[in-house]
Amino acid sequence: MASHAQAQDLPAKEVAAVGGSLHVVGNFRPGVDPRLMHILEVAAEQTPEYRVEAFSGYRAGDKRFHGKGMAADFRLVNPATGKDLPNYQDASSFRAYEKFAQTVRRVQMELYPELAKQLRWGGYFSGKLGKYGAMDLMHVDLGGAKVGMGGGSWENGLTKSQRGIFPSAVSVGMVQ
């Protein structure tokens, strides 16, 4: 089986064969930083309660982090039902995605501590319901050196302001 670093050179249709518990599906395109893909793969292996699927990676022409190979989108799938947990601006699945994102953070800190200031999770992106990118539960990127997470932090979870916008979202920071 190819490693994620090797996967960067594979045609898109062959990328699906890469990985252990991380399933690469749909329109995923190679070109994502291999460290981020490795982090996602290890985190997926540590999350047996869900099938983790990476479905969006490099996006040619995108001026944001996907177009720079610095972002990936994923979904959590309930293995009992085969249904995806809602992954965008949906408070009902916030805690499940937050737990997975926190696993991603722990793995990143163990394997790539030099990325501590870069790793961001979209669930902590600020904004009201309907604002593009706010509470983007499916998104991780390495853009933290350029843009922070205004709606929350790894340590404390959602900010008081963001909790007010999404009051039914259950959020528990990593230090609580």
Image (cartoon, rainbow, N blue to C red):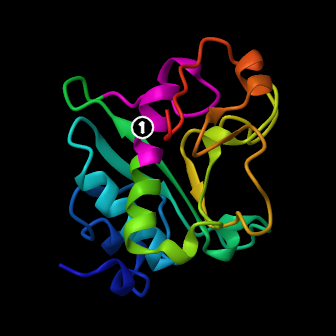
Residue 27 location (% of width, % of height): 48, 58
Residue occupying the point 45% across, 76% down: 35
Residue occupying the point 60% across, 33% down: 88
Secondary structure that dominates the magenta span: helix
Residue 86 location (% of width, % of height): 50, 27
Q: Quadrant of residue 151?
A: top right
Residue 47 location (% of width, % of height): 27, 44
Instruction: Work out whether 130 lies above or below 53.
Output: above
Residue indicated by mark 1: 99
Q: Quadrant of residue 9?
A: bottom left
Can residue 129 be spotted in the picture? no
* Closest to the observer, 18 or 171: 171
* Closest to the observer, 58 or 22: 22
Crowd class of label 1 (few under 14; some 14 to 19; many from 20; radius 10 Å): some
Residue occupying the point 59% across, 23% down: 90
Residue furthest top in the image: 168
Look at the image and tell me in which quarter the N terminus lies: bottom left
Taking the magenta stretch, the answer to whether it contains residue 103 is no
Can residue 6 be spotted in the picture? yes
Residue 170 location (% of width, % of height): 53, 20
Q: Find numbered disc 1 in the image and state the secondary structure of the residue it sits on.
A: helix
Instruction: Work out whether 118 lies above or below 3.
Output: above
Taking the magenta stretch, the answer to whether it contains residue 90 is yes
Q: Is residue 3 left or right of residue 95?
A: left
Residue occupying the point 78% across, 43% down: 150
Instruction: Work out whether 81 lies above or below 48.
Output: above
Q: Is residue 118 left or right of residue 23?
A: right
Which residues fall within the magenta stretch? 83-102
Residue furthest front in the image: 175
What is the tally of numbered marks visible in this picture? 1
Residue type of the residue flagged with mark 1: Lys
